[in-house]
């Protein structure tokens, strides 16, 4: 695990350890909200102009569209979301989070597939920390992803 603090433009921007802990905890809140079907709570962690960039999907912006996209993932079999923060970098009111993810996908035929990969999230402090942009990509080869979607 690696993290660095860059010069903050505001003297009251809080300690880096506090920012890192806050980001880690909010990421776990996001997973918990998704896993319990509270897509509105997960989407509320995005800034009003936040962008959710899921693989093989058009980017969506705004809490309602993020909520609908998360719900559609669940309806398409995505369950048991696990995010692990590996690194947080911050400067002032912006933080970048790098990590790993794991999903279990339940297919219509009853089989299960595990997808693992990496994610990147940019957070902005707006009173509270909110996701400005979030994206993830699989570590599975493209052919395997196509077979999993079938």
Image (cartoon, rainbow, N blue to C red):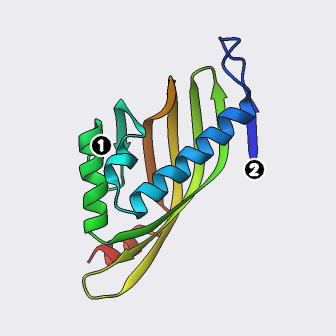
Q: Is residue 97 left or right of residue 144?
A: right
Q: Which residue is mark 1?
A: 59
Give the vertical position of 48 relative to 73 (above or below). Answer: above
User: CA–CA distance between discs 2 and 1?
Assistant: 29 Å
The label number, if any, that marks residue 141 in the structure image: none
Q: Secondary structure at mark 2?
A: loop
What residue is shown at x 26% (from left), y 78% (from top)? 150
What residue is shown at x 61% (from left), y 46% (from top)? 24
Q: Is residue 21 left or right of residue 66?
A: right
The label number, if any, that marks residue 1 in the structure image: 2
Residue 109 location, x and y as percent? 26, 88
Whether residue 52 is visible here, answered yes or no, is yes
List the single residue furthest toward the bottom: 110
What residue is shown at x 56% (from left), y 26% (from top)? 94
The 10 Å Cα crowd at callout 2, few under 14, some 14 to 19, many 20 or more, is few
Question: Which residue is nearer to you in this view: 145 or 61?
Answer: 61
Residue 28 location, x and y as percent? 55, 53
Q: Is residue 85 left or right of residue 105?
A: right
Residue 102 location, x and y as percent? 51, 66
Question: Which residue is nearer to you in this view: 7 or 74?
Answer: 74
Tell which circle, 2 or 1, labels the residue nearer the N-terminal end.
2
């Amino acid at each position: 695990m690696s993290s660095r603090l860059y010069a903050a433009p505001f003297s009251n921007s809080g300690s880096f350890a506090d920012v890192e802990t806050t980001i880690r905890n909010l990421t776990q809140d996001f997973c918990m909200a998704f896993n319990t079907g509270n897509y509105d709570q997960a989407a509320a962690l995005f800034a009003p102009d936040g962008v959710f960039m899921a693989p093989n999907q058009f980017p969506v912006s705004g809490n309602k569209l993020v909520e609908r996209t998360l719900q559609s993932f669940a309806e398409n079999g995505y369950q048991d979301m696990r995010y692990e923060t590996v690194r947080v970098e911050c400067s002032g009111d912006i933080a970048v989070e790098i990590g790993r993810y794991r999903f279990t996908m339940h297919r219509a035929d009853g089989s299960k597939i595990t997808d693992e990969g990496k994610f990147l999230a940019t957070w902005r402090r707006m009173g509270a920390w909110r996701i400005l942009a979030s994206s993830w990509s699989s570590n599975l080869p493209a052919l395997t992803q196509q077979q999993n979607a079938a």
